[in-house]
Image (spheres, rainbow, N blue to C red):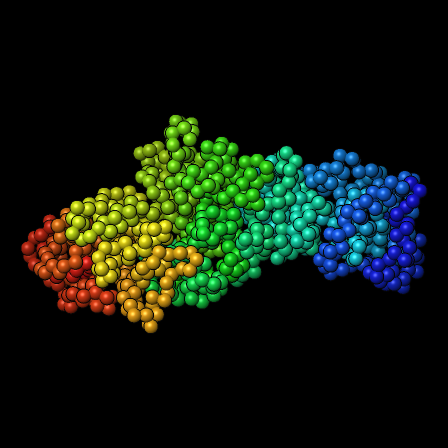
Amino acid sequence: MPAEKAAVRKSVTEKTAAEKTVAETATGKKAAGKKAAEKKTAAAGKAVTKKAVTAKTTTKKAVASAVAKKAVAKKAGTKKAVAGKAVAAKRSVAREAPPAGPLEVALSPALDADDRERLLHGTHHQPHAVLGAHPAPGGIVFRAFRPYARSVAVVTGDLRAELHDDGDGFFSGLLPLREVPAYRLVVAYEDTVQETEDPYRFLPTLGDLDLHLIGEGRHEELWTVLGAHPLTHQGVSGTRFCVWAPNARAVRLAGAFNFWDGIGYPMRSLGSSGVWELFVPGIGEGELYKFDITRPDGSRTQRADPMARRTETPPATSSVVEASHYEWGDEEWLARRGERPAHEAPLSIYEVHLPSWRPGLTYRQLAEQLPAYVRELGFTHVELMPIAEHPFGGSWGYQVTGFYAPTARLGTPDDFRFLVDALHRAGIGVLMDWVPAHFPRDDWALAEFDGRTLYEHEDPLRAAHPDWGTLEFDYGRREVRNFLVANAVYWCEEFHIDGLRVDAVASMLYLDYSREPGQWTPNEHGGRENLDAVAFLQEMNATVYRRVPGVVTIAEESTAWDGVTRATHHRGPSGFGGLGFGLKWNMGWMHDSLEYMSHEPVYRRYHHGEMTFSMVYAYSENYVLPISHDEVVHGKKSLVSKMPGDWWQQRANLRAYLAYMWAHPGKQLLFMGQEFAQGAEWSEEHGPDWWLLDPAYGAEADHRGVRELVGDLNSVYRSTPALWERDTSADGFAWVVGDAADDNVLAFLRRDADGTPLLAVSHFSPVVRHDYRLGVPDDISAWYEVLNTDAGRYGGSDVFHPDPVKPEPQPWHGHPASIRLTLPPLSTVWLRPA
């Protein structure tokens, strides 16, 4: 090749200002460097004591404009120059004389044409095998793939050698060295020069054990190995990027740091694990990135990281390199949260849609207001939705794209940790809605992630969710199951979450869920149960309870599936082991009781069984009684608006219903806004109508009265073990009267572990009933009223019992004694032994 581009570039007239600086700095050291070089053998070329100052810039962004505009022209010029090179030419390629003297750089062995094409077209699965530094006959061959670069030089110690331009962004050279040295690259672009580490000189960052566990689907800390992790590797700071994409022909890394062009950042395949990995020096926290995946058919797609621990704020979709620096202050809370199982402890939940609770507040601003408000109301826990990142706010967070990332709408992951910490320090537990049932079809997220079905089931009948236009996970694939099990552990361990409310469990359990005959395929036994989903839920629950003592998992499950809250190793009548949840939403109680309350009192006698039927199955599972967001949207009306009658009767019905709910066996859940009788349906766009509690509003007292009742319900509830200690034991409950349909009266006893009772009497009729006789035990000398929803300060008519009520020796309702009460209208009264 008659013309040598490297020699032409040595001219002073083509030096950049940065290169001149390097030359000037090196001049003073030149004599000493030559003397040292004379004493060295060819094998000692790397033993130098001081590194020459080389050209370097502090940012890559300065080249963005020039690179983008001149890339095509540069490539054409590069190819032209390569065509004219002399194959046998060997000469020094340093821009300025290196301190250690001239270093001959030979043309390296030619890069295989197939390797070259695959790197150019994004289909190479082992770029580290050809790029970087490798022993070869005659020395060490250095290869770099730097599209758009004008030149690339290798610097090791005091030695600097410029690589030959092989065209298309490839640079190479053979140096007379015996071993691969520690080296850096000096890359010259149109307007700047960068000195940087070569990503392709590093060993893999994942070990055999991690890859084995990933392959087995048993890596319980999957988030620590996949995704983006800033770290120091082989003494160099950077970020490790790892992604599971077993069907991909190749994966490249694209981000803001390379102007979203991943051509120069191919990742390596780590064998049969399906994992692709690349350690990029100099990349740190806050960098935006995606994975540029070449599908099996050769097409390409850029995807957000499924394991990203932070994302851009929607509608932007990039992943963000993240590392936590948060220092927790909730040690006391964590130490005592496991003292008592959740089903034997007081548990009343305030369900919160975080973005709309106080619209516009960040996680840290919420931490200043939410803990104080919940503590004032007396709830033991909050349940937060939506937490995991999701593209559409109107979905309430139930179509997740970032399973490992708290939504960026409200702040950073550490900001979310700050909120959880603040709630814990206020004595409030934190539950979160968790959605392992399905995911959306967004083409930058999980759907056909690497070009084929991966996270979703390969059978279209099993993949498409019939109700929500989403895709269902393939629970039979061990890596997918691992992705979800590790995700459950992740939220509990990394964010100190105290419990997971698992959404849409019923849709996971049944193959024919919302499907007509012919639209589903039976399991291997011919049944409708999704055996893969059963195994997944059992594994998830067993793993979470084993790793994180004190947490609770709660199933939103609406069917009569046997053993939702039974231990996984205990088989039931159906032959299945239990699913292993701690608690289950009692959807039957919710629908039945709301149906009863919606009727005018005069017709309630015909629906009395809707209030008593729940006790037929009350101890078949460990239940939560939910009045959730689902019940106060989409035309269902707010809780108070479901009640019949005028405004006074609506509020009275609501108060009586809430006290009945708090006394019924099971834990309580109330969605925000219902605690102060909001009349309008909730909307995620504006949240609760806080103005109803403004003293300037004329009906403020009506709403504040209901809120005061909720606070008192929680206060008495927490101090009365009879209301929660034996929630899951039949001997903790006894009917006093359950068949007084004509009177619209329900009365029952709750007992704690010592047998101490509480008497709850609900009267769902708008009249006063005087001298209403109720049977009671004869070992209680007197009863006093501890709560009355008709109290004047709640907005009631103030019919109450100021003095203790003494039993009479007259048997009634199957009890040896009885008391006579005046029942207030539309009310619930609680009485305890005096």
Q: State which quadrant residue 768 falls in.
A: bottom left
The C terminus, quarter of image: bottom left
Which residue is rendered at x = 54% and y = 41% of the image?
A: 447
Left or right, residue 99 beside residue 432: right
Compared with 151, 120 (above or below) is: above
Which residue is rendered at x = 49% and y = 43% of the image?
A: 439
Residue 759 visible in this rendered orientation of the protein:
no
How many circles with numbers are drawn on the protein?
0
Image spot of residue 9 (x, y percent): 88, 52
Image spot of residue 24 (x, y percent): 88, 63
Left or right, residue 609 beside residue 156: left
Which residue is rendered at x = 55% and y = 56% of the image?
A: 313
Which residue is rendered at x = 72% and y = 46% of the image?
A: 264
Image spot of residue 726 (x, y percent): 27, 51
| Residue farthest toward the bottom in the current orientation of the protein | 696
The N terminus, quarter of image: top right
Residue 540 visible in this rendered orientation of the protein:
yes
Return the residue nearer the eye: 265 or 429.
265
| Residue farthest toward the left in the current orientation of the protein | 810
Image spot of residue 591 (x, y percent): 28, 47
Left or right, residue 77 beside residue 272: right
